[in-house]
Image (tube, rainbow, N blue to C red):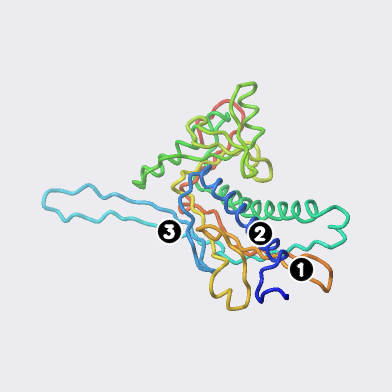
Amino acid sequence: MPALAGLTKQSDITVNAREVDFVTVFNDNWNALRQILGIMRPIRKAAGTKLTSYKASLTLEDSVGEGELIPFSEAKVTPVAYDDLTVEKYAKSVSIEAVAKYGAEIAVEKTDEAFRNELQKKVLKRFYDFLVTGQLTETYGTFQMGLAMAKALVIDKFNKMRKDVTEIVGFCNVLDVYKYIGAANITVQTQFGLTYIKDFMGYSTLILLSEPDIPRGKIVAVPVENIDLYYIDPSDSDFAKLGLQYTVAGETNLIGFHAEGDYSRATGATYALMGMALWAEYIDGIAVVTATDKEPSGGE
């Protein structure tokens, strides 16, 4: 008796399970990062949304004589526009010869893992490049003083803006940290490809990076309230009108993934679609402090 029409075959299940696994692990990794950084729920944006940060200031008018007209205090919020939030497309292909030689676990699964990791790194790299453009800049002599003052600078800035700061995340070079702590017994954690220390010198999280992500002697501090994650939904109905169906997973569709075989080339192709950006709302709410590793100079 012939198989039922529309029967889901084993090959269909295998490919679909692979797609679901890819996007699920990707989303789980980003959820872990959100917890590390203290980011609130990701914010969905339309493609082409302008990534904009702001510089905020307020000149308080408080010298008013009896019976005089009360002047308005001048508040300024200056936008600083950067790139658009765009859809990014990626593809990977594995040959049937590679599977025959190395097996599916290496040729398919390991390359999927590497593919996913590189996509994650790309988003993080852009975030690091953006962070070092922070506008609260000063120079201090020692790493310890630099850490302390970077935190103080962002607290002072947000106090002046009358905005709350609950936790502060720091970014610095891993060599600077280990040079500072020496043989001290601290707990270093690794997750999402990040090495970090929790609750270190007043920072909720201190993320340890290497060059070129952050140069030696640089310390970046940013309040968790100043970090957002924007994303474009790959399952957007407008994309589907092109006949493009990407597998997504979870409540937040950060990435779309599709796998299919190319019989004309005897290869397995995979396609990823995403549009993500880690961002800070206030560019002048990011401290970038330089530690010269000399005697404290008291700042610039």
Front of the two marks 2 and 3: 2
Mark 1–mark 2 contact, CB under 8 Å?
Answer: no
- The quarter holding residue 126 reads bottom right
* Disc number placed over residue 261 in the picture, else none: 1
Q: Secondary structure at mark 3?
A: strand
Check disc 2 and report its element: helix, strand or loop: helix
Q: Secondary structure at mark 1?
A: strand
Q: Residue furthest left?
A: 67
Quadrant in the picture for the N terminus: bottom right
Q: With 82 as the anchor, is 225 left or right in this view?
A: left
In the rendered view, tell whether residue 95 sits above or below residue 155.
below
- Check disc 3 and report the residue beneath it: 78
Q: Is residue 219 left or right of residue 60?
A: right
Q: Earlier in the sequence, mark 3 or mark 1?
A: 3
Q: Is residue 183 above or below residue 16?
A: above
Callouts 2 and 3 close, C-beta under 8 Å:
no
Residue type beneath disc 1: Gly
The residue lying toward the viewer, choosing from 50 and 289, is: 50
Identify the residue at image location x=79%, y=55%.
104
Residue 256: x percent and y percent? 61, 63
State the residue at coordinates (18%, 49%).
64
Q: Which is closer to the viewer, label 3 or label 1?
A: 1
Query: In percent of the image, x 40 and y 42: which residue is there?
Result: 165
Q: Which residue is disc 2 drawn over?
A: 17
